[in-house]
Image (cartoon, rainbow, N blue to C red):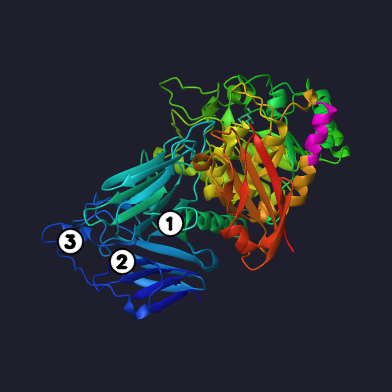
Amino acid sequence: MSILKRGSTIVLETKNYHYVIAYDTFGYVHSVHWGEKCPIEDYVVDDIGNVNPNHPNLDQIRCEYTPFGKTMYRPCAVKLHFSDGCREINPAYSSCKIEGEEVHITIKDCYYPLEMTLNYRVHYDYDIIERSVTFNNTGKDDIVFETLMSTELTLPATKPYHILNTNGSWGAEFTPTDSVLDGGSLTFESRQGRSGHINSPYFIAYTEADEKNGRVFFGHLKWSGNFKIKAHRDFLGITRVTLGLNSFDFEHVLKGGQSFTTPEVICGLADGLGNMSRNLNRFGYSEILPKNFADKELPVLYNSWEATEFDVNVKDQSALAEKAAAAGCELFVMDDGWFGARNDDHAGLGDWFVNKEKFPNGLCELIENVNALGMDFGLWVEPEMVNPDSDLYRAHPDWAYHYDTRKSNEIRNQLVLNMTKPEVQDYIYNCLNDILNENNIKYIKWDMNRPFSETGGENLEHPKMLWYLHTKAVYEIVDKLKANHPDVQFESCSSGGGRCDWGALEHYDEVWTSDNTDAIDRIFIQKNYALTRPVKTMRAWVTDVNWYNRDTPLDFRFNISMRGVLSLGGNLNNYSDEDISVCRKYVDLYKEIRPIVQFGDLYRLLDIDKDEISAELYIDKEKSNSVLFIASVNTRCIKKAVPLYIDGLDDNRIYELTFEDKHYKKSGSFFKYVGIPIEIRKQYYNNIIKIKAV
Ligand code: DGJ
């Protein structure tokens, strides 16, 4: 039992920490403590009372969830108006229900028919608590929400926190940003209709931390649409973070008798960034990822995009498939270009019907060829979009978001479909369901290549609800398709990694990490992806991309891609037999180590940013089998004899490894505390080392 109640104090207990809540006699629900465990009887909360002689008093309350109203002026978690125009919320604690690993604390407005229930689910082993809020309109009239956060987290008052988020872009996803919040507010958000490439729907906060040590707080919003993360530090040094749906251009109307539950937030605390990543990784595949594939090894796939772009047809794709099979691939994914009048990005989106010139006998012919080679088949789609040059748009111009009075801006020659319309949802579901019923398809790459604009939808009584309703509709369609086709894997893609949040991870089995497949850039992109998400969701292709005019060796490229879910994406037609056998060698090795990479723990030993060498160790849960990837791009000033301290092994067991012809048989503690010297004197150095317990 991880939830304890003593008087008005509620303690959520995880393996290493306590999260403590208490209500006072005035009905305020306080955040008392989040950190190391203390005796329960020591946790008390003082009544602050309702009187605010000179306003700091009420702003001092460490509320679990701050409503707008009274004399509280700090950022609030919820703001709304009632039908009579009143914009105050005046809530007080009402009840607490403990059910297994969940606790639900209900707060009721003292004057209006509004109930708010703070929901908590404890994941003891991972030091993680999931939170959300349920609103209940128990009256008859509408309640209109203007701000509707999922969670407010109060961090222990201490010196200023570093707040980590991302400031990325297409091709540079997950680029970290680290700001010290000394006072005032920091905001990270998306207004694009998707979580996007720029900021991410999470925060990580620490005062002093590195891979191994230091208290690290984090919160991840499970949401793939517009979001807002706001961290605020007040004069007293209290840092509060709110996470939720973006209140920009937002409205949510709760009719009488209706209830609404916000997206959830994964809240956690860890000792060091390494432990944070490992806990999230394990938590992800055991608790969040869709069950169909969560515990299955994901296949090595080939994707046609970089080889053929839109120029797909049965003959050329079949020829590519032969090469992919020879390289050891298990799944062949045909990307964009197979449908409608899709010869480039100007036409066809929305017409999810096979292009008969390219595939005269439908997709079946190609799929049979692929299956005969021993591979499964996968297909690319971009269901939320339409090209104005398409039969769908000509028939239903009103199916795209638009305003009648102005021209819609196109991005990549496409518009966004109004997914809040039931007829649009039905069309998309039926098209995809038919394709899956008629063909032996095992993989869908669901792409989404532009942010929203001109978001008018004449169907909506409350148009600003579209941001929420769009993402909800996407989740519902994916879930329904998955339920109907449980053996089909779904990948979330949005111009690369534009929709890689924990909401997406709850509905899709994996994500396309980035369109940037340059192996050197990928070291950074993948490192930052895996900081906060499960490795087994990180698709990583080996390709021939050469954006920078550097010829990165094939084995180096494999070294980087094998740290995620290995895939191939180069033009195999240009590969020599020798190249194909190099691919085969690495694909075979990957299949051998795949359970360790996809289900193991990741230890970042050397950091490319700080050490010029990237060394990452993956180890299985039993700490018996491990694989160590080392790569370095350049050698400066003879990077010689750097000691590599191999963390992650069991101190008390003996392990064997061979590094550059030198064989070691030593204890885990030796590898960890004494380390082995490594000497890097090579451009594009790369090495994959298996480590086995004796
Ligand atoms: C963007 C994706 O990120 C690419 O991998 C590819 O699928 C293209 N779209 C196809 O249009």
Q: Secondary structure at mark 1?
A: strand
> Which residue is denoted by mark 1 in the rendering?
216
Q: CA distance from mark 3 to mark 1?
A: 29 Å
Percent x, y of residue 108: 32, 65
Image depth: mark 1 or mark 2 in front = 1
Point out the quarter of the image occupied by ligand 1. Answer: top right
Find the magenta span and give its range: 576-585
The part of the image, by quadrant, that contains residue 540 is: top right
Q: Does residue 578 belong to the magenta stretch?
A: yes
- Residue at figure coordinates x 37%, y 72% from the top left: 95
User: Tag 2: Cα neighbours inside 10 Å, few (<14), some, or many (≥20)?
Assistant: many
Percent x, y of residue 351: 66, 27
Q: CA distance from mark 3 to mark 2?
A: 14 Å
Q: Does 580 sit above or below residue 113? A: above
- Residue at figure coordinates x 36%, y 52% from the top left: 242
Give the mark, 3 or 2, whose residue is nearer the N terminus: 2
Type of amino acid at the residue the image marks with label 1: Val
Answer with left or right where residue 251 lies relative to residue 434. left
Residue 82 in view in this figure: no
